[in-house]
Amino acid sequence: MYDRFEKLEEDKKMKIINAGLSIFGENGYTKASIDKIVEIAGISKGSLFYYFESKKNFFVFLYVYCANKMEHLAAENETNFMAYTDFFQRLKKIEYIKTDLTIKYPYMYSFLMKAYSETAPAVKKEIQNINLQYTQDETLKFYENLDYFKFKDGINPKMVIQLVIWCSEGCMNQLLMKRKMNPYSAFTLEELTEMFQVFDSYMELLRKNFYKEEYL
């Protein structure tokens, strides 16, 4: 359906995709400005509509694109993280894998979070139909065969999983906030190292507070 776009050079495609993720992720579908998207992408409005025909098509394309990237990343790395049975070791590995994708698409996660519950009538039905294709069962396999017995009595592992996700999102958002003056350039090794160190410190704090003493 988007053959014209797919024929572009990879660098140009990435600029257009990341521009869309950034503006839609920040403003939602209705308030997102196509003028701002094309300004960031370095193309004309006519070119964007030549590739996608409409704002709606571009938004839905981005959502499907991101969902597919996340699914493929999980499938490709399943053997890597499933080898870890310790709760925090595996979740740290999963978050590192997700971060690798975020490095290439800095605004993917914020876009997905906003688009997932998008209420704009123009795209709401399409987003709901796409969501049905990505079942909860696929997500649950990330947490199979973990050593839940290491947790202190009364600790709910599902709540800890949510804390880990929030920590990961917070660390990435903090990195993005620091780079507002130059938001579309690549992350430096120093920036990523600092982010991983902060994330690791939070994981160690959770582990010490939620694990039984004999597993520390």
Image (cartoon, rainbow, N blue to C red):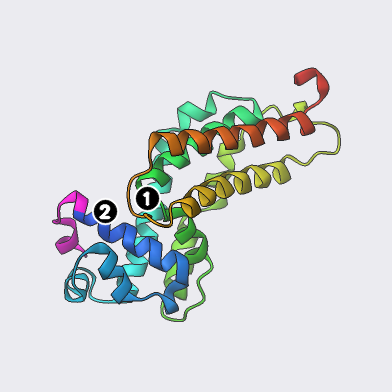
Q: Is residue 37 above or below residue 72?
A: below
- Report helix, strand or loop for mark 1: loop
Which label number is shown at residue 105? Answer: 1
Q: Residue at x 51, y 35 (%)?
A: 194
Residue at 80% across / 18% down in the picture?
214
Q: Is residue 45 above or below residue 170?
A: below
Provide the residue span drawn in magenta.
Answer: 1-11
Residue 199 visible to the viewer: yes
Label 2 packing within 10 angstroms: few (<14), some (14-19), many (20+): some
Amino acid at pointer 2? Met
* Residue at x-position 41% and y-position 68%: 24
Left/right placement of residue 6 relative to residue 148 reads: left
Q: Which residue appears farthest toward the front when viewing the image?
A: 181
For badge 1, the amino acid type reads Tyr
Say which element carries label 2.
Answer: helix
Numbered badge on residue 14: 2
Give me the disc on residue 36. Answer: none
**50 horizontally vs 101: left or right:** left
